Image (cartoon, grey):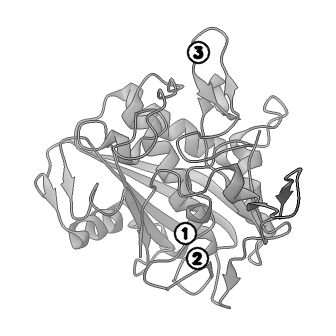
Amino acid sequence: MDRMAASSTLLLLCSLLLCSYSTAAAPRKLVLVQQPPLVLKYHNGPLLRGNYTLSLLFYGRFSAAQRSIVVDFVRSLSSTGASLPPPSVASWWRTTARYAGGDVHLSLGPQLLEESYSKGKLLSSSDVAALAGKAAAGGGHRAVGVVVTDGDVAVEGFCSSRCGTHGRLAGSAGFVWVGDSARQCPGQCAWPFHQPIYGPQAPPLVSPSGDVGMDGVVINLATLLAGAATNPNGDGYFQGPADAPLEAVTACTGVFGSGAYPGYPGKVLVDPTSGASYNARGLGGRKYLLPAMWDPVTSQCSTLV
């Protein structure tokens, strides 16, 4: 199951609210017709539930600072510390508990480094699955293998049709792969921290970590983890065809804050010192920008701010 974290596909205000104009006698009136709720159908398959371990494999050469961006994000997902009031990474993740599967608690597992490019710099989908299996090895059915590839690695379909993948993996709870797009396609896989290739060309936001590629990795990792939790086997929550589904976050693509429309990610928070844009606090003083997630209670795309 391939999932692409693409730029916004939602419409402008008059598409969000479906504006129409009356043709009656003057004065002409603007009529707002509310858009029907977004519905992700539950296809009655199993969902993740309970405690899981995310085992990370960094494929390629990542600095310690780059790895820590991802590690701190994972650590923040299920944080319950009182020092992190909403909006936080943990409060974002808690939306998944509103799905039929209930609470999903993710904890950080082993971290592996593959700096020698053991499978080369051109990876097939099967190569990615094999690396994920290595990451999850020994963790059993409660382990999720997460592979992060560096900017020098080309992966089948990367940039052309996807920014990452989640899927099934024998002997584990599944796998997730994301790539650092900074050198290859930041406009596709690191928006809104880079100008998009197509569409409105508004100035990009300042990334919280100062590393556009790795902050893009976090956006896509968040997207895929939500999909893995709520549609792990392709028969959970999704809209559209099973081979190209809109899932918990991809159904809300391009929305990061209230009032989003094509080319505009929505209202977000801005750090007064660095000018960086974010909407979620993480452990260790981290700040992250996380995408909207579909809320099955409200049938709307839920944003943190």
**Residue placed furthest toward the top:** 273
15, 272: nearer the viewer: 15
Circle number at residue 64: none
Quadrant (top left, top right, bottom left, bottom right) of the C terminus: top right
Nearer the observer: mark 3 or 2; the answer is: 3
Mark 3 highlights which residue? 275
> CB of mark 3 within 8 Å of CB of mark 2?
no
Local secondary structure at mark 3: loop
Up/down of 22 relative to 208, above or below: below
Residue type, label 1? Ala
185, 12: nearer the viewer: 12
The image quarter containing residue 243 is bottom left
Image spot of residue 295 (x, y percent): 77, 64
Q: CA distance from mark 3 to mark 1?
A: 32 Å
Up/down of 237 relative to 260, above or below: below
Classify 10 Å Cα crowding around label 2: few (below 14), some (14-19), many (20 and above): many
Local secondary structure at mark 2: loop
Mark 2 highlights which residue? 231
Q: Residue at x 25, y 70 (%)?
A: 125
> CB of mark 1 within 8 Å of CB of mark 2?
yes
Up/down of 83 relative to 264, above or below: above
